[in-house]
Image: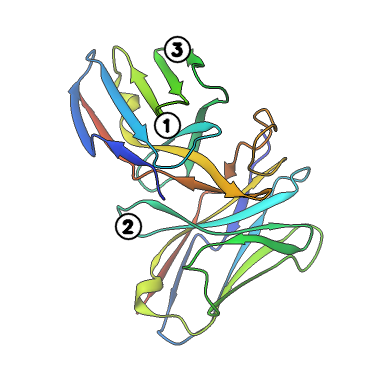
Amino acid sequence: EPEVTQTPSHQVTQMGQEVILRCVPISNHLYFYWYRQILGQKVEFLVSFYNNEISEKSEIFDDQFSVERPDGSNFTLKIRSTKLEDSAMYFCASSEAPPGRGHAGANVLTFGAGSRLTVL
Amino acid sequence: QQPVQSPQAVILREGEDAVINCSSSKALYSVHWYRQKHGEAPIFLMILLKGGEQKGHDKISASFNEKKQQSSLYLTASQLSYSGTYFCGTEIGTSGTYKYIFGTGTRLKVLA
């Protein structure tokens, strides 16, 4: 079963430091996503990415955040100058097709196991 | 904007049934259901694409009422393995661009 791989599984950082979370999406998937989940709370959309550019982003995804596909396989989320409230589980996901009508289920998201970020 | 789920939490005994509802203030084009075990990633359960569609596998099924902008997930004869947090997911957007968002979540605990 193809899977989405995320590293690191857990990162502890000091407030103000930069963090890069890495993801390897499923190889034939073209659409990539980052979600955030603060402990025990809802899964929040951060950003979607296609064709080397951001498709959609939420109000959470401010200038502190950036995403990149530096090569053919990795998809990264960078958080500059981390804050205490950035502590959360970050999930990467990928899909064959984009969200939106008419893709008949090809837009089902496959999630990675998550990267837990703890900001001290 | 985020779909609202009810109940927020439910505790069941093994073998009991449960219904989880997902309501949206905006039109739902499709509804996906996911289950998340503690500390793990959400796992896809099923997708409903058309209003009125009902789907199921094993003892978990779902319905989609496009007109009412609602979906319900039915868990029948619950098993211990059903414990987790259930999220509905839906696509929202305009002008050809969409994003995929999740509902508020329902915590389900099944006791022996």
Quadrant in which the C terminus of chain B appears: top left
Question: Where does the image place residue A18, in percent across and percent down from the top left?
Answer: 53, 82
Pointer 1 indicates a residue of which chain?
B
Give residue B69's mark. Answer: 1
Specify the quadrant of the image occupied by residue A116. Answer: bottom left
Give residue B58's mark. Answer: 3
The residue at 47%/41% (across/down) is B42
The residue at 40%/80% (across/down) is A83
- Work out whether residue B112 can be spotted: no
Q: In this view, does A80 lie to the left or right of B11?
A: right
Marks 3/1 in contact by CB < 8 Å: the verdict is: no
Q: Are the residues under badges 3 and 1 in a single subunit? A: yes
What is the three-letter code of the residue carrying label 1?
Gln
Give residue A47's mark. Answer: none
Marks 3/2 in contact by CB < 8 Å: the verdict is: no
- Work out whether residue A35 can be spotted: yes
Question: Where does the image place residue A108, in percent across and percent down from the top left?
Answer: 61, 36
Q: Which of marks 3 and 1 is nearer the N terminus?
A: 3
Give residue A39's mark. Answer: 2
Marks 3/2: CA distance? 30 Å
Crowd tier of the residue under label 1, counting other residues whose Cα lies within 10 Å: few below 14, some 14–19, many 20 or above = some
What is the three-letter code of the residue carrying label 3?
Asp
Tag 3 secondary structure: loop
What is the three-letter code of the residue carrying label 2?
Leu
